[in-house]
Amino acid sequence: MNEKKIIPVFYASDENYMPFLAVALTSLKEYANKEYVYKIHVLYTGVLNGYATKIREMSSDNFQIEFNDLSQKIDEISDMMHCRDYYTSAIYYRLFIPALFPQYDKAIYMDCDTVLRADIAELYAIDIGDDLIGAVADQAVAAVPEFREYTKNALDIDSERYFNSGVIVMNLKKFRETDFYATFCDVLRSYDFIVAPDQDCLNLICKDKVYYYDAAWNKMPIGGANECEPKLVHYNLNLKPWHYDGILYEEYFWAYAKKTPFYGVIVAKKAAFSPERAERDEAEGKRLIALAKSEADSPTNYIRSVGRLCKA
């Protein structure tokens, strides 16, 4: 009897995001094909709480969930990590996948603030050739003039080519062959990226080595609902249905949240989300746009300083 094909899927989470990870996993499992084995790896650091036990209980014969502690690896690059505001070190976890999981030549990484509406095996099956990454152009960048100016003027990447790193297919074999990790550390060490630290680095290193998927595979609640029928919804930035009412595609999130053991926890989190927190969200959004504008205009931004030296 032939062994079932393995679909490796990675998430990164801390304790606070475990309930939302459960929602993402519930949607993933809903569309999982019995012909495949979905190997789910949850990357984390620190001590796990009781939430992890409940998530492990979601495992089945073809839906296997494993937690992998990256504390030691994160310590190795702690002096280089730049985390802005609400970001944590979790944004860097995906960088260790190629080295720590040599059994895989290809894998999918997804943020926890995602909900699937199709089988992720469909995305995995698309051949990305020798490209390092398969991804979708970042719709949040496309929607904001300051972000478009930033990617072009600070990174020398056109906004329609700047991808979102929250949903990516990683060519792990190619990552290892090109010593991606060492290159990433060199880039991270060379400049203090303050707008989107890991995502900017990934875009710089993978430039011209990206396979672009249809926007349906990373649809954000921005730009209207008629653009495409989403296969994956990504509640990016502050567009969280567990904080605000009226978020586009919120019905998909809540439909799966109700199927998790954390529904009450999530409802309580929303109820506890105060007007003061909403004001901080708004202020953070404005500050991020201002940072992007400042970097785009700066005579010492990455492409005008470090990038220029690299091209010399």
Image (cartoon, rainbow, N blue to C red):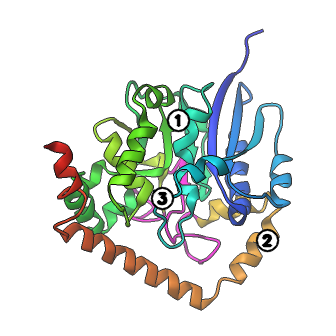
Q: Earlier in the sequence, mark 1 or mark 3?
A: 3
Whether residue 243 is in magenta: the answer is: yes
**Crowding at mark 2 (Cα within 10 Å: few <14, some 14-19, many 20+):** few
Rounded to the nearest angstrom, the CA distance separating label 2 from label 1 is: 31 Å
Residue located 37% across and 46% down the image: 186
Q: Secondary structure at mark 3?
A: loop
Give the residue at mark 3.
81
- Left or right: 138, with 40 as reference point: left
Name the amino acid, label 1: Leu
For the question of whether residue 113 can be seen, the reply is yes
Name the amino acid, label 2: Val
Kindly report which numbered mark, 1 or 3, lies closer to the viewer in this rendering: 3
Q: Secondary structure at mark 1?
A: helix
Which of the pair 55/142 is nearer the observer?
55
**Crowding at mark 3 (Cα within 10 Å: few <14, some 14-19, many 20+):** many
Name the amino acid, label 3: Met
Rounded to the nearest angstrom, the CA distance separating label 2 from label 3 is: 31 Å
**Residue 256 locus on image (x, y percent):** 72, 57
Kindly report which numbered mark, 2 or 1, lies closer to the viewer in this rendering: 2
Rounded to the nearest angstrom, the CA distance separating label 1 from label 3 is: 30 Å
Asked if the residue under mark 1 is in contact with the one under mark 2, i.e. CB atoms within 8 Å, the reply is no
Q: Secondary structure at mark 2?
A: helix
Determine whether 121 is above or below 88 in the image.
above
What label sits on residue 135 in the rendered view?
Answer: none
Which range is magenta?
Answer: 221-249
Give the residue at mark 1.
123
What label sits on residue 265 in the rendered view?
Answer: 2
Residue located 77% across and 36% down the image: 64
Please identify the dominant SS of the magenta region: loop
